[in-house]
Image (cartoon, helix red, strand yellow):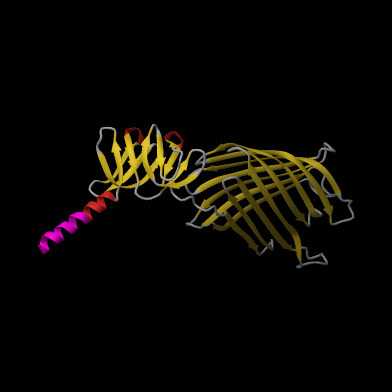
């Protein structure tokens, strides 16, 4: 008697376990039981105790029932948490709902969790020391970061460069003194809000100070539209256009200038391999008040990974000001070899 009771209890437990499983009925009336793990791209995966993971096209499923609530992602972007109690007339019947979910509107069952957006960027350092016929010491740093979310993007960057030469003219009163030959610092901030997958509106601002260019502060701030022409696993190409207010304040007695300018910009990123990429961008500010007054900056950089987080880069930066301070050149060129860290 005791053995019979044990066998009966075991059979009852196994039966209850089988009844508690999810169930898929195929078009040929075969039945699969187990746990429905996911549905994506029109195929359902069920984990069967006997067969392991089995993937079945939705078109071959006549009925489907889950014992617990599952996450249902719709093609409209909604996320529901319901128990599926059957399939009828091309719709999922959901527990507790007076309406059904159309199979045509079902995107996924138990979609993978969406990764939290995180900042992506780098910090790079460069330095130079020479001693002999030319005595020079130089140091610089550059930082850039961006945060991409579903509907918007924030971008920030900053750069600083400092350099001195030692006066080697024995007849000069400043012989062997260090003389400044570069001190510049700048930063930018931009916010993009996507209207469609490719079109976005933006607001942007930028500041720059350059001692040897007699520039105490150049400020620009404005708004516009951008469009993403190419965005795939290797290449990104965007263009932007809008209006900006520009103010240039000089270190000398040269009068300050301010004007409204058009802002025209583009940026290309291309990955040559999994470790090396090219980044090229141009940002121009032609004045709407004086055709002769415009400023642009172009950047070209090749970045390669040395380790998982350490990078090296070779870059060229050109600043062109068609109306510089009196006695200053229109063009400044910089070539920078840097090492740094990505995140």
Q: Nearer the viewer, residue 57 or 152?
A: 57
**Dividing the image into 4 quarters, which one contains the C terminus?**
bottom right
Q: Residue at x 74, y 53 (%)?
A: 207
Is 168 magenta? The answer is no
- Is 116 on the left or on the right of 253, as rendered? left
Q: Which residue is painted at 26% across and 53% down in the image?
A: 17
Q: Main secondary structure of the magenta part?
A: helix
Residue that appears at 44% across and 33% down: 104
- Magenta stretch holds residue 11: yes
Image quarter where the N terminus lies is: bottom left
Q: Nearer the viewer, residue 281 or 206?
A: 206
> Is 58 on the left-hand or right-hand side of 341?
left
Name the residue rendered at 25%, 32% in the picture: 28
Q: How far across and down, in percent of the image, does residue 46 sit?
A: 31, 45
Residue 98, image x, y percentages:
46, 40
Residue 323, position as x, y percentages in the image: 82, 44
In the image, which residues are magenta?
Answer: 1-12
Q: Nearer the viewer, residue 66 or 335?
A: 66
Residue 194 drawn at (x, y percent):
62, 41
Q: Quadrant of residue 84?
A: top left
């Amino acid at each position: 008697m005791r053995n019979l009771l044990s066998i009966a209890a075991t059979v009852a437990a196994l039966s209850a376990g089988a009844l508690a499983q999810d169930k898929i009925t195929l078009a040929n009336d075969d039945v699969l039981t187990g746990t429905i793990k996911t549905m994506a791209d029109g195929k359902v995966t069920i984990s069967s105790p006997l067969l392991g993971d089995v993937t079945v096209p939705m078109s071959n499923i006549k009925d489907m029932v889950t014992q617990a609530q599952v996450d249902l992602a719709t093609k409209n972007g909604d996320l529901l948490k319901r128990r599926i109690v059957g399939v009828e007339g091309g719709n999922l019947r959901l527990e507790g709902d007076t309406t059904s979910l159309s199979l045509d509107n079902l995107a996924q069952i138990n979609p993978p969790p969406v990764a939290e957006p995180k900042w992506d960027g780098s910090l790079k350092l460069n330095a130079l020391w020479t001693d002999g016929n030319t005595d020079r010491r130089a140091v610089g740093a550059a930082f850039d970061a961006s945060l991409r979310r579903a509907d918007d993007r924030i971008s920030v960057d900053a750069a600083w460069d400092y350099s001195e030469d030692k006066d080697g003219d024995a007849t000069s009163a400043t012989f062997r003194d260090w003389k400044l030959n570069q001190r510049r610092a700048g930063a930018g901030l931009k916010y993009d809000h996507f209207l469609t997958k490719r079109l976005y509106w933006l607001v942007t601002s930028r500041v720059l100070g350059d001692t040897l260019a007699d520039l105490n502060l150049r400020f620009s701030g404005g708004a516009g539209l951008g469009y993403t022409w190419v965005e795939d696993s290797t290449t990104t190409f965007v263009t932007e256009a809008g209006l900006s207010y520009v103010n240039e304040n000089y270190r000398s007695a040269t009068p300050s200038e301010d004007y409204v300018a058009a802002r025209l910009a583009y940026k290309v990123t291309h990955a040559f391999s999994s470790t090396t990429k090219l980044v090229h961008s141009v940002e121009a500010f032609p004045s709407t008040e004086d055709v002769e007054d415009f400023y642009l900056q172009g950047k070209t950089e090749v970045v390669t990974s040395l380790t998982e987080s350490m990078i090296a880069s070779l870059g060229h930066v050109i600043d062109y000001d068609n109306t510089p301070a009196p006695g200053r050149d229109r063009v400044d060129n910089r070539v920078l070899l840097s090492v740094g860290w990505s995140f």
